[in-house]
Amino acid sequence: MKLALARAASMRVSSRSGKRPASSHCFDLHASIDRRACLRAAIGKALDREQWPRRHASGSAQAMRAYGKGGVNSVHQSKEWVRMKKLLFAALLLCSWTATAQVQPKYFGYYANNGAVSENADHTNITHIGVWTSDRVQALNSLLAELQQARAHGVKAMLAVAPFLFKQGAGGACPYQLESSASIHWNTLVTTLVDGGYIVPGNSAASTVVAFYPVDEPEKCGLSDASGLAHPALANALSTIRADYRTRDIPVAVIASENYGSALQGLRLFDWTGLDCYGCGSVPPWQDLSQTAKNTAYLDAARSFWAKINVSQQKHILVPQAATGGMMTDYGYAHNPTIMYQAFLGDPKMAMLLPFLWKHTNTTGVSGNASLKADYNTIGHMIRNDAEFMRQSVPAYMDPGATQAVSVTLRNTGTTTWAVGGTYRLKAVGASWGIGSVVLAQAVPSGSEATFNFNVVAPAQAGTYGFRWQMERTGVVLFGQPTANVQVTVGDGDEPPPSGGECNPVTHICTEVP
C-alpha cells in the first residue's frame, strides 16, 4: 500500500531506512561480529595516522591476521611492533569507551516526508527521505536536496537507498534483484555523503544520516526467503552496507507488511523493524471504544510480528496509520496517537515512532487533520525534548514569606539542545513559590546536565506545599521527568523539618536524589 501511495504522489512520498545501533560497538549484543568490526575500523584509522608501512600489511584486517597469528616474526622485536601493540591497546580502549558512552536516541518523524521538513521540523527529530527511481544519479540528487533541508532544520535523516543496492524495474518498481555491482554504487553514495558532511563515520551525533532503509515491505518486492535462508539479493544489500567501515555502525531498518511470514529470515538481518497493519482495528475512533481487541489490534499485531522474528537485539519502529480518506480507510482507534505514544514510552526497545504519513495528494495525512496534527505535534515535542531529574537542594521548612536559595539539576536526555534566550526554561508545577519559571544560563546539549540556582519565596499562609518543577519549551509543552515532589512545611517559629530525607538541621535544606 505504501509503495502504491508513494508512486501516486509523483515523487512526493517515500519508503524507510536504518542499521546496527551505535551502542553496539565492541562489547554489546553483537559481540563476536561488532567487536571485530570496531577494532578493524579503529586500527585502520590508527594505521593511517601512523602511516604504518604497507609492506607489513595492506590493510587493517590483514594486519590483524598477520600479527594475530604471529606471522611476521621479524617485526616482533622491532620498535614498530611496540608501536603496533600500543595502537591495539588504544583501539581496545576506544571501542570499550564508545560502547558505554553512546546511547540510542529515540526518534519521531513521518514516513514519506519528502519536501515537508520545513513544515514539521519544529516537532520532529528525524525525517524519512524516499526515492522512487532506479536512476542512481537522479536518486542521489534527490537525497542530497532533502538532506540539505534536514541539516538546515537540525533534523536527522533515514535514507531510502534501494537504487544503490538492488536491480530494480523502471521507476524503481518491484521486484528487486541481486545487484552484482552494489559495492561500487554504495561506495559512490557513501563517499558523496561523507564528503558533504552528512555522514561522519563513528559519530552519529555529528551526522545527519542516522539510518538506512534499503527496501520497503521486502516480501512484496520479490525478496521472500529462499530455501530457508534470507533472499540472496537482500542479504547482499545488507552485507554491502556493513562491509563499509563508514556505514557498518549505522542502523539498517525495514518495515514489513501483514504478509511478512514469507520473509522472516531476511527480516532477522535488520537492526530496526516495524510493521504496517492498516487493516488492524480500522474502526472509527468514536465507535466501539469498549472493544479492547479492536483498540489494541495494531499493537497486538506488531508485538506478534516482533515475537516471530525473535531477535533480541533488534530495535522496534511503530508505524501507525495517520491518514484517512481517498486511498486509505479511516485510521481507527487502534492507531490512536495517545495509544501509540504510551506504547512507545513503555518499551525500551522502541527506536522510532513513524506515523504514515504527513501529507499526500491521494489521502488526508496529519497535516490536513487538525486533531491528529495537534496530537502528534505534542507527542513529537515530548520525544524530541526529554529530561531526567538528577537532584535538587530544597528547604524542608520555611517561614511564611521567607526567601531561600534552592538548586535543581536535570539532564537533557532528548535529541535537541536546550537553547538559551527563554525558549527552554524550568517551570514551577503546582504551588507558587514567588517565581514561575527560571531560564537557562547557557545552552545544554543532549546528554549534558543543567543546574538551576535561584531563590524562592514561601507562601504567606502556613501549611504544607509541594515543591515540584519540570522543563518546558516556552509556549509549547512541559516535557521530561519532573523533580521529586518535596513537601515543604511553611509555618511560624522554629518548627522542626519533617522526618525522613537528607535534611540539614540548621538550614532545613533537603537534598533529593532519585
Image (tube, grey):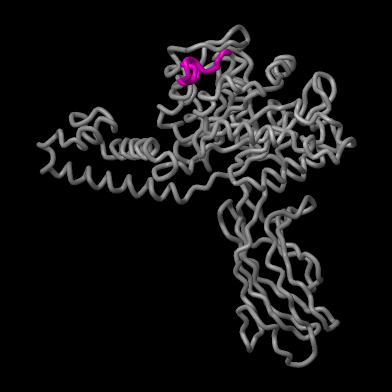
- Asked if residue 449 is positioned above or below residue 80 in the image, the reply reads below
Whole-percent x and y of residue 149?
65, 31
Left of 504 or right of it: where is 455? Answer: right
Residue 227: say if magenta. yes
**Which residue is at 72% across, 33% downward?**
298
Q: Using the rendered view, name the quadrant where residue 113 is placed.
A: top right
Task: From the viewer's side, name the closer residue of 248 and 174.
Answer: 174
Whole-percent x and y of residue 390?
60, 64
Residue 479: say if magenta. no
Q: Is residue 135 visible?
A: no
- Asked if residue 509 is positioned above or below residue 340 in the image, the reply reads below
Range drawn in magenta? 222-235
- Asked if residue 14 is positioned above or below residue 471 in the image, the reply reads above
**Which residue is at 57% across, 26% downward?**
213
Q: Is residue 305 visible?
A: yes
Whole-percent x and y of residue 69?
18, 35
Whole-percent x and y of residue 75?
13, 38
Q: Using the rendered view, name the quadrant where residue 389 is placed.
A: bottom right
Magenta span: predominant SS is loop
Point out the image quarter for the C terminus. Answer: bottom right
